[in-house]
Image (spheres, grey):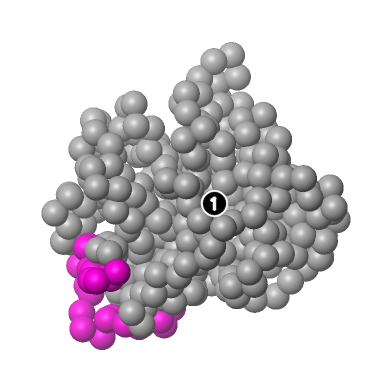
Amino acid sequence: MLAIFFIFFFPSLSLSLLSDIIIEPKSFQQLDLGGLAGPESIAFDPLNHDPYTGVSDGRVLKWQGAARGWIEFAVTSPRRNEECNGHDNPWLEDMCGRPLGMQFSKATGDLYIADAYYGLFVVRPTGGLANQLASGAQGIPFRFTNGLDIDQATGIVYFTDSSMIFPRRDNTLVIISGDRTGRLLKYDPRSKEVTVLLEGLAFPNGVSISNDSTFLLIVETTTQRILRFWLQGSKAGALEVFAQLSGYPDNIKRNLRGEFWVAIAIGSESINDVIGICFNENGEITEVLNDNFGMITSPLSEVEENNGSLWLGSVVAPDVGIYRL
């Protein structure tokens, strides 16, 4: 999650060097949220492949096609009331909840949710009030639960807590202050235990596991880079820089080919129109998504590749964008 509305300029890779791998979408579509906003992350259920997203008023929505649009599927906050419906006020988020990272378990069909204020949740395929799994680790409450991914082979959930000081509504201060209190954690559904894997991170944001489950990629927004944390093999436990970016990255999602799409919320001067970059497992850029249509006017939070399209999330937009490839 990143919502900053000022731009710094950094040394960066020129667009001319990326021209051969810029993809040209065939069309662009927007799925209006019906007056709601902020579709931070997008997840597709393993049975019907319907898209779900969390929005600013604390609800998780499910897309039911053009005729019905988005319907309410789940909520995270037990304190949620009528005042929450339709709001876009950051100061109500700690009451209403704010779903950020989401992912389905293919084995159970359950949806796991990282709520910025309440922690880690799971909700059954029938929806409703999600069940809180964890609200802190090592005696320290989560302050800014953010990105999430699941190892589908083991069911282990990996997630980030972006800061132990600043909540989501103060996300710009995480960057400005140089805060390095972010953590990478895992939740084991069998033991129901939460383990801290890494500490001292500078705004850890999106997280994604590799196809073979040997490593995790963690977006570190403040330093504008992607880190690789090895889970298995001779490098297990090691942390290294996977890619240095230009501009501020947000979420990262793996596609079926084992590549990783990272959303660029705000780019540098020389890649100003780049909103997404795709990396292979070696850290090489394979595709670049350029906003040629000029349709994305708000900070992008996620690029999720699904069934020949790129689904675009945003922390403030009133719709979910879809680039048809």
Is 158 included in the stretch rendered in magenta? no
* Residue in the picture at 44% in, 67% down: 320
* Residue 51 visible from this viewpoint: yes
Q: Position of residue 38 (x, y in %)?
A: 44, 71
Farthest residue in the bottom direction?
83
Q: How many marks?
A: 1
* Residue in the picture at 47% in, 57% down: 311
- Tell me the kind of residue under disc 1: Leu
Residue 71: quarter of image: bottom left
Q: 14 left or right of 263?
A: right
Above or below for 96 versus 114: below
Residue 35: quarter of image: bottom left
Above or below for 36 versus 207: below
Name the residue beneath numbered marker 1. 325
Q: Position of residue 249 (x, y in %)?
A: 63, 55
Viewer-proximal residue, 60 or 274? 274
* Residue in the picture at 17% in, 50% down: 125
Q: 268 left or right of 106?
A: right
Magenta stretch bounds: 66-93
